[in-house]
Image (tube, coloured by chain):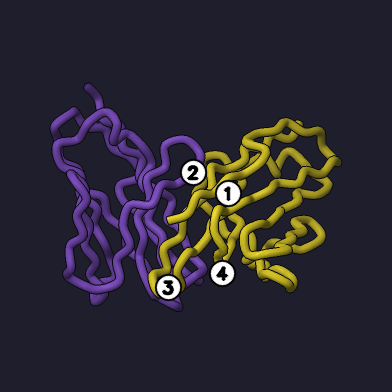
Chain colours: A yellow, B purple
Amino acid sequence: SAVISQKPSRDICQRGTSLTIQCQVDSQVTMMFWYRQQPGQSLTLIATANQGSEATYESGFVIDKFPISRPNLTFSTLTVSNMSPEDSSIYLCSVETDRAYNEQFFGPGTRLTVL
Amino acid sequence: EDKVVQSPLSLVVHEGDTVTLNCSYEVTNFRSLLWYKQEKKAPTFLFMLTSSGIEKKSGRLSSILDKKELFSILNITATQTGDSAVYLCAVGDYKLSFGAGTTVTVRA
């Protein structure tokens, strides 16, 4: 497994502002992902964070709204831009530590509330 | 479109009971099925299943996969209040599709 940290753990933001969430892993990993979990819902994949290139977004998610950076194999950020109350969710990063096993481990999550 | 369906959506049991959670799936790219336990924010990894018919066990939890019928079950025996959580099933390759989860409440 891997030790994954996320910052901030929670935040309350005003609509129209942006928030950047950081994900740090204690070892180098090939695959990093960002998920969203809206209240009462299950997890939905936002994008795959690719090291050294643009993230790969899932249907319904766009780079202008959720820009992602991945400068190295242990760190990634997700920005939630121009926030509205509908963006209130838990945002989670996950990593796959070994391509041979396809096990994904999740960070502690960031609970975002947009007023 | 990938589909992962979990049942039941919720259940309430008493300590000591056994629960069985179901997960059925239809996905384009299957590599593994994963079970997670979610208590607050972060899902905690429980099992990864790739082969049919091989039971995985961890303490009071066990799980098995049927790739022919496209489903998996997660069993929890001798339940404890600490087992109260949402149990998530996820299927796919490196991109996972999640089910809606089963909320398990264990009463003392």
Q: Which chain does the residue under circle 4 lie in? A: A
**Whole-number angstrom distance, CA of label 1 to CA of label 4:** 17 Å
Q: Which badge, 1 or 4, is on the more N-terminal residue? A: 4
Q: Residue extending furthest right?
A: A16
- Report which residue position mark 4 lands on: A30
**Whole-number angstrom distance, CA of label 1 to CA of label 2:** 7 Å
A31, above or below A84, in the image? below
**Whole-number angstrom distance, CA of label 3 to CA of label 2:** 24 Å
Report how many numbered discs are placed on residues in the image. 4
- Report which residue position mark 1 lands on: A92
The image quarter containing residue A35 is bottom right
**Whole-number angstrom distance, CA of label 3 to CA of label 1:** 23 Å
Pointer 2 and pointer 4: residues touching (CB < 8 Å)? no
In this view, the mark in front (2 or 4): 4
Residue B42 location in percent, x, y? Answer: 49, 43
Pointer 1 and pointer 2: residues touching (CB < 8 Å)? yes
Do badges 1 and 4 share one subunit? yes
Q: Residue at x 60, y 50 (%)?
A: A36
Query: 10 Å neighbourhood of mark 3: few (<14), some, or many (≥20)?
Result: some
| Left or right relative to A78: residue B107 | left
Residue A5 location in percent, x, y? Answer: 58, 45
Do badges 3 and 4 share one subunit? no
Mark 2: which amino acid?
Answer: Ala
**Whole-number angstrom distance, CA of label 2 to CA of label 4:** 20 Å
Pointer 1 and pointer 4: residues touching (CB < 8 Å)? no
